[in-house]
Image: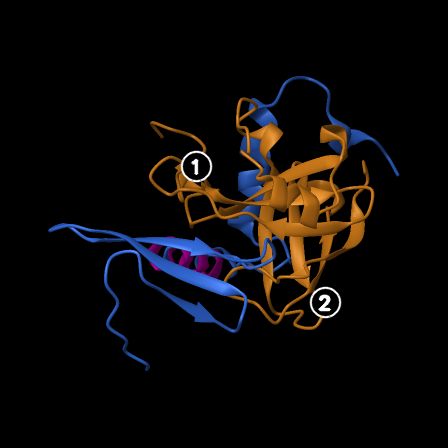
Chain colours: A orange, B blue
Amino acid sequence: MDQVDAILSFPAGLIGFPALKAFRLFEPRDSYPLKFLQAVDRKDISFTCVDVQAIKPDYVVPLSDEDARSLALHEPADAMVLALLAIPEDPARMTANLAGPVVVNTRTLQARQIVLNIDQYPLAYLVFPGK
Amino acid sequence: MLVITRKLDQSIIINGNVEVVVTGITRDGVRLGIIAPKEVEVHRREVFEAIAAANRAASAQGAALPRPVRDAAALLRARLPKSDPGSEEK
């Protein structure tokens, strides 16, 4: 999935947006490494996200058996983990939501937002600490 | 809202397939055990709400690459190791 442009299916929706089951994931040419998740039925709703590899390579999602099963994920290599970003006016203060990562099965294009313990995983991880 | 009194080790059944058991009662709180089919998601409300709020906060930016988003992409690119798929013409 290099030049990403795919329709992802979120059977459970995104948290807080349960009705939106399909999002287009795409990466405009000049936006690398940022990608966008845009609701197929609500073009006005979109999220900026990034492959967690690009911001925190040591990040590991403790995927429960049930999460893995619901995504039909068998091979770790099939998984892409995206973090949703909040980008303020000063982009150096952007934060990534590491408590609710979006895990994508790149083979089936099924995706799911995982709910992690907010005591252990930051909701607003400062991508550029100390700026 | 349905309000039911339960004692330690008593439970309620919801929808025939979800059981909520009171497994402990202390001064600090009530401990609940939840037995449900795998596809039923159970979250502490505050965690769910926090992530929903973060999602709503993150949903503001459109896909039109407004300046802060363009700048954010540039900042991230500058920090990433050399290989630059962004320059790959397609």
Report the disc number at residue B76: none
Q: Tell me which chain the residue with mark 2 is part of.
A: A
B68 displayed left or right of A3: left
Estimate how packed mark 2 is, as few (under 14), some (14 to 19) or many (20 or more) residues with alpha carbons within 10 Å: some
The answer, for residue B43, to whether it is visible in the render is no
Query: In the structure shown, which secondary structural element does the residue marked by tag 2 occupy?
Result: loop
Residue position marked by numbered label 1 in the rendering: A92
In the rendered structure, which segment of residues is drawn in magenta? B45-56
Residue depicted at x 43% and y 37%: A92
- Give the percent coordinates (x, y) of residue B20: 39, 61
Residue depicted at x 80% and y 49%: A5
- In the image as oriented, which residue stretches furthest toward the right? B90
- In the image as oriented, which residue stretches furthest toward the left? B27
- Distance of label 1 from label 2 (alpha carbons): 29 Å
B51 displayed left or right of A72: left
Looking at the image, is mark 1 or mark 2 nearer the viewer? 2
Same chain assignment for discs 1 and 2:
yes
- Residue in the foreground of this view, choosing between A69 and A48: A69
Q: Quadrant of residue A107?
A: top right
- Residue in the foreground of this view, choosing between B22 and B79: B22
Marks 1 and 2 in Cβ contact (< 8 Å): no
Give the residue type at disc 2: Val
Report the disc number at residue A40: 2
Give the residue type at disc 1: Ala
